[in-house]
Amino acid sequence: MSEIDLQNSIKNKDEAKIIDLLEDKSLNIEMVKEIYFAFKTHKEIVGQVAMNLSLRTSVYDRELEYSETIVELLRDLATNEADMGARWAVAKNPHTPTDVLSLLAKDEVNLVRALVATNPKTSPSVLEKFFSDEKIVRDGLSGNPSTPVKILKILANDADKMVRMRLAENTNATPEVLKELLEDKDENVAMAARANLERQA
């Protein structure tokens, strides 16, 4: 799409066309920015911008599609009230700055906090505050390779078996923590801990 076509779509408030455009992760990031700031209060478009940013990035290749424009959009989306789903996308994005993750760590929505807890870029000092949060948040925390060891040790005794299971599968769980999980009352947790220990050997 040309810049003129985009300007016409924005001017004519052609929401359907703009939403279709945002489904394309190869859309020029500057065009995504232009759309976002033109429709910043439009719930569906704000959500599609957040989804577009998610499609451009990957937890497996954190440098994929990094740009200052993406960071600018993530910063703004984190405080945009138009679409709560946008905060979910920001919380899990590998390019979200640590200060934004710290802000989202205090979000009233537990799924936003859970996604911050899973983000490897979240600072250890923020992650430490999650160990007594709701189960969904502790579940994310237990699988995060950046979670401090002292928190992993606490989570090894969590009442919820899924928290312990994610911990048993965590690639950064120490042999000490995994050996403790070998004795877990849930045999699936114990098996996962054994498999992780074997991979680490």
Image (cartoon, rainbow, N blue to C red):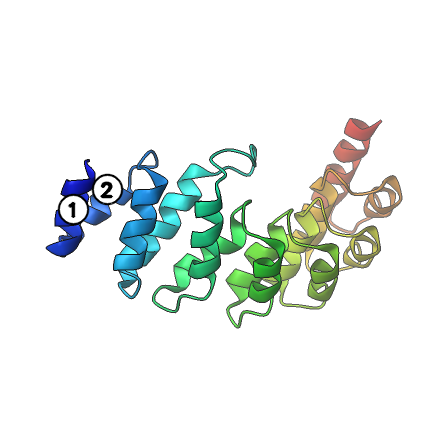
| Residue 103: percent from left, percent from top | 58, 66
Q: Nearer the viewer, residue 184 or 140?
A: 140
Amino acid type for the residue under numbered disc 1: Lys
Query: Compared to 23, does 114 lie above or below?
Result: below
The label shown at residue 192 is none
Q: Which residue appears at 66% of the width and 59% of the height?
A: 138
Q: Quadrant of the C terminus?
A: top right
Residue 153's spot in the image, x, y percent? 83, 54
Which residue is pictured at 12% across the width and 48% down the height?
A: 8
Q: Secondary structure at mark 2?
A: helix
Residue drawn at the location 18% of the way across and 44% of the way down: 6
Nearest the eye: 62 or 186: 62
Total numbered labels placed on residues in the image = 2
**Residue 186 in the image: x percent, y percent?**
73, 49
Q: Residues within 10 Å of mark 2 (few under 14, many from 20)?
A: many
Mark 1–mark 2 Cα distance, whole angstroms, equals 6 Å
Q: Residue furthest front?
A: 4
Residue reaching furthest to the right: 176
Residue found at x 43% / y 46%: 69
Residue assigned mark 1: 17
Q: Position of residue 70 (x, y in %)?
A: 45, 46
Left or right, residue 25 beside residue 67: left
Q: Are marks 1 and 2 in contact (CB under 8 Å)?
A: yes
User: What kind of element bears circle 1?
Assistant: helix
> Which quadrant is the N terminus positioned in?
top left
Q: Is residue 132 left or right of residue 20?
A: right
Q: Amino acid at mark 2?
A: Leu
Res. 21 mark: 2
Label 1 environment density (alpha carbons within 10 Å; few <14, some 14–19, many ≥20): few
Tell me: 119 left or right of 77: right
